[in-house]
Image (cartoon, helix red, strand yellow):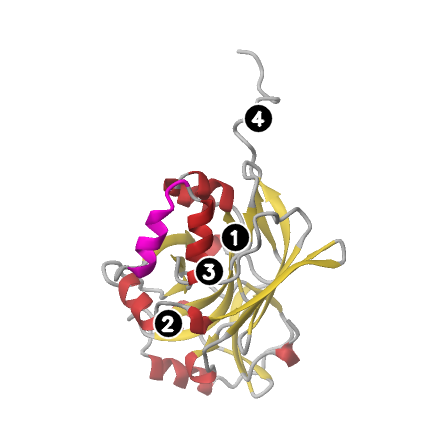
């Protein structure tokens, strides 16, 4: 995403020869921030805003990395009716998705450590042992260490529908693997973003559009505050946390991602995240490379 197309406020991680730095874009100008994202999210919301507004040192052009430093990424499932219906259709245990959709307690699961998050322009992964793979374009919520909603970030919760559909207990394998989580290009603070947000997905293959779709966060059955309350209910996050809010765009059963596809996730007013697709891992069922004992 080009700087001129960024929102009025945008917090980005800069990858420099001297390591990572953080910059805030205010009014078309990038300025270096004192400290990292974890330092910012350790502050109350008003104090974090004041620190950003106090940034004065102009930042030179930089390569953009994934907008996390010490934060864990978690995700919520079955928050859209469309997601519930598709999960029920693909699963051998369909009723559990209907029950969690209407339950008071949401489905929350661990997605990625900060070091494993793919940034804008990086390659996201599809598992070598999966036959049906899709991106899940989502709005990411960024929380302070105290559980206050700090901002928003585009996210891609890469998923194996074949693995999860085979057995819901395989969810960690369907969701947590190399290059399965992408975030970026920037965090837009809550005071600079509206909502609800329109979310768009475009998948490019061989120079053409293989799939596209749109949804709105107005269709989410949970509020950001409710999801955050459950995430922080019994787990401390001293560096803050990112929570993906589920997807309302699900490609048809006839579609699966392939290597070299390009995935674009657009969150209106927040940003556009673009990543190429690659195959990761191996299929343990393939014994062609085994040697006789």
Q: How far apart are the two marked residues, 2 and 1, measured between alpha carbons?
A: 26 Å
Q: Nearer the viewer, mark 3 or mark 2?
A: 3
Indicate which disc, 3 or 2, sits on the residue closer to the N terminus: 2
- Report the residue that reaches farthest toward the top: 293
Percent coordinates x, y for residue 45 in the rendering = 34, 80
Percent coordinates x, y for residue 79 in the rendering = 39, 62
Front residue of this view, candidates 258 and 41? 258
Q: Residues within 10 Å of mark 3 (few under 14, many from 20)?
A: some
Q: Which residue is mark 3?
A: 82
Q: How far apart are the two marked residues, 3 and 4, measured between alpha carbons?
A: 35 Å
Indicate which disc, 2 or 1, sits on the residue closer to the N terminus: 2
Read off the magenta span. Answer: 92-102
Q: Which residue is mark 2?
A: 41
Percent coordinates x, y for residue 93 in the rendering = 37, 42
Q: How far apart are the two marked residues, 2 and 4, measured between alpha carbons?
A: 45 Å
**Residue 274 image-quadrant placement:** bottom right
Q: Was residue 100 drawn as part of the magenta stretch in this picture?
A: yes
Q: Which residue is mark 1?
A: 158
Q: Secondary structure at mark 4?
A: loop
Q: Nearer the viewer, mark 2 or mark 4?
A: 4
- Which numbered circle lies on residue 286? 4
Q: Nearer the viewer, mark 2 or mark 1?
A: 1
Quadrant location, the N terminus: bottom right
**Residue 46 image-quadrant placement:** bottom left
Q: Nearer the viewer, mark 3 or mark 1?
A: 3
């Amino acid at each position: 995403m080009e700087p001129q197309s960024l929102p009025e406020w945008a917090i980005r991680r800069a990858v420099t020869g001297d390591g990572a730095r953080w910059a805030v874009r205010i009014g078309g100008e990038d300025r270096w921030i004192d400290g990292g994202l974890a330092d910012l999210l350790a502050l109350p919301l008003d104090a974090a805003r004041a620190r950003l507004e106090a940034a004065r040192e102009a930042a030179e052009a930089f390569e953009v990395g994934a907008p996390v430093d010490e934060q864990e990424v978690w995700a919520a499932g079955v928050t859209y009716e469309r997601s519930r219906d598709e999960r029920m259709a693909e699963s051998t245990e369909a009723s559990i998705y209907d029950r969690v959709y209407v339950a008071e307690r949401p489905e929350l699961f661990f997605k990625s450590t900060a070091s494993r998050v793919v940034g804008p322009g990086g390659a996201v992964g599809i598992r070598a042992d999966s036959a049906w793979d899709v991106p899940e374009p989502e709005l990411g919520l960024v929380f302070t260490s105290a559980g206050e909603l700090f901002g928003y970030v585009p996210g891609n919760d890469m998923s194996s529908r074949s693995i999860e559909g085979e057995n819901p207990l395989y969810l960690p394998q369907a969701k947590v693997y190399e290059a399965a989580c992408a975030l970026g290009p920037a965090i837009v603070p809550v005071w600079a973003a509206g909502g609800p947000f329109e979310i768009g997905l475009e998948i490019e293959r061989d120079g053409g559009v293989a799939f596209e779709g749109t949804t709105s966060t107005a269709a989410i059955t949970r509020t950001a505050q409710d999801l955050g309350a459950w995430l922080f209910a019994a787990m401390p996050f001293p560096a803050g946390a990112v929570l993906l809010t589920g997807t309302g765009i699900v490609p048809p059963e006839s579609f699966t991602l392939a290597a070299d596809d390009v995935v674009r996730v657009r969150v209106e007013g927040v940003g556009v995240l673009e990543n190429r697709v690659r195959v990761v891992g191996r299929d343990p069922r393939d014994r062609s490379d085994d040697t006789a004992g």
